[in-house]
Image (cartoon, rainbow, N blue to C red):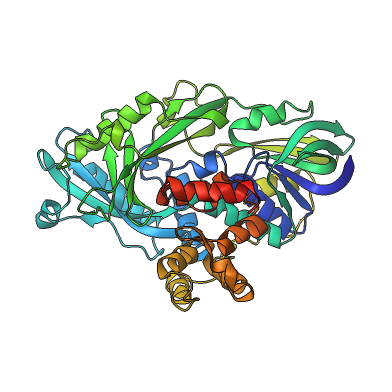
Amino acid sequence: MTSHSVDVLVIGGGIHGAAVARDAVGRGLKVMLAEKGDYACATSSSSSKLIHGGLRYLERLELGLVRESLVERAELLKTAPHLVAPLTFLLPIYHWQRRQALVLRAGLALYDALSFGDGLPASGRLDDDDIAQLPRLRQEGLTSVLQYCDCTADDARLTLAVLLDARARGADILNRRAVTAITALANFYAIELDERGQRRRVEARFIVNAAGPWVAGIDAMTEVAPPARALRLVRGSHIVLPMPEPVQRDAYTLQDDAERVVFVIPWLNERFLMVGTTDVPHQGDPGEARCSAEERAYLLTAYNRYFAQAGGPATEDDIVFTWSGVRALHNDAGAKPSRISRSPALSSVANGTGGFVSLYGGKLTTHRALAEEVLEALHRLGAEMAAPWTRDVPLYGGTLSRPELLACAEQGPRTIPLATRHRWALTYGDKIETLFERLAADPGSAEEIAPGVTRAELDHATDAEDAMTAEDFLLRRTKLHLMLDEGGRDAVKRRFAVGA
């Protein structure tokens, strides 16, 4: 069993673990990150794919959370322009809804004020002619349609961009590296790892537990762990429908009778509609979370209540894909799952001159700010480090604007179809040049393994991004699982079976 020493061991390769590792290594700490599965293989790839302030949090007067989220939204538009993009959201108002237009317009005005200076369009109201042209939206009982701007993102790629930035700065980042035991010793912890089948021992002065819904299990591995917080595991599920004709280009924020909201978002070049999310208590292994029949029915009902399709209501047979993620929220006793705050919470404990910090809650949008809070907690425990540095610093692949990236794709090798080059630009960002360099060095790597999937891209996924299975590549490094037919998916699986 080999041994290694680090300042900080981060447990969990989701968005928050990634952000902590990046911030810590950039402050001069020696960092290792352990992820037992693939990067972003759970909650961080199972979100609503939104970078947003959280309009619904205004109703609960969580103004600090909304303001912080809107500041971070503006930050991500600058630092990850290939992965984060603005999108117009429409908010239809019907006479049967509790929240009527006057209240919602006031909320949107406050949302605008809290996001002042970010360059995104202000909220407003559609005129009657525009409302009449909205495809499929039911008109009976419709009193108004409001509009506002938020952002969408590729959550798994965003997590990967943070991780790869941390690695580029010197952090030891690896997937399929599981923590199997933690022993508290004087001033540090001894950790046993199963690293892709190899046993390894690591000594870390500090541990950061960013294991999401597995946070309690990691804490339980040692007697010197932070005080436990009450924990609620809440599952959020989504369904994916084919895009009807005519194409819906704007997203919708829908209200239901329980005062929740459901988003309907055009996805993957407007080929699909993403509908979600639910908020239900989760029992069992978070890694086995699935969209239940009840959740599918709830989301279909919400969709069909607002939209009328020529071929009849959307049904179970129309669902082409689902996903579910489990959020680890610090408990708000008695609150409905949808009403539990998404504000993060930290718990920490000193171990001599070392210590242990555990994370609860948090949002995809505010991962950078939460990492700063974690580093401050480590500083209070005795970690010596440089000052905060991550604000306005581009993520891995994020140095070029979208127009610049698309121009780069236009100038790329003609052996690769333009549509594929465009996809690469908005997947890999400025690292598209790495793919072009591969093609220049090995022209044969332009060979397509499946439609739009070249050997060069698969080699990049395995060599630079640690993809080890077809699922890693099809679901998290890309979203090609939905874009390819069964034959294309099988071709990728065969490639990984023999070694990509």
Q: Residue at x 62, y 44 (%)?
A: 38
Find residue 20 and report its horizontal and vertical position in percent: 66, 49
Say which quadrant the C terminus sits in. bottom right
* Quarter of the image with the N terminus in it: top right
Residue 96 placement, left or right of 210: left
- Residue in the picture at 71% in, 48% down: 174
- Which one is nearer the viewer's eye here, 426 or 342? 426
Residue 70: % across, % down: 44, 54
Query: Quick one: 450 or 76, which is closer to the camera?
Result: 450
Q: How many marks?
A: 0
Q: Is 475 on the left or on the right of 204, as rendered?
A: left
Q: Quarter-wise, where is residue 102 in the image?
A: top left
Q: Residue at x 71, y 29 (%)?
A: 219
Q: How far from the left and from the top, in percent, is residue 202?
A: 84, 42
- Percent x, y for residue 340? 46, 31
Q: Quadrant of residue 277?
A: top left
Viewer-proximal residue, 119 or 179? 179
Q: Quadrant of residue 23?
A: bottom right
Say whether residue 269 is left or right of residue 49.
Answer: left
Tell me: residue 427, above or below residue 317: below
Q: Is residue 81 visible?
A: no
Q: Is residue 174 visible?
A: yes
**Residue plotted at (37% across, 59% down):** 86
In the displayed structure, 240 sits above or below 220; it is below
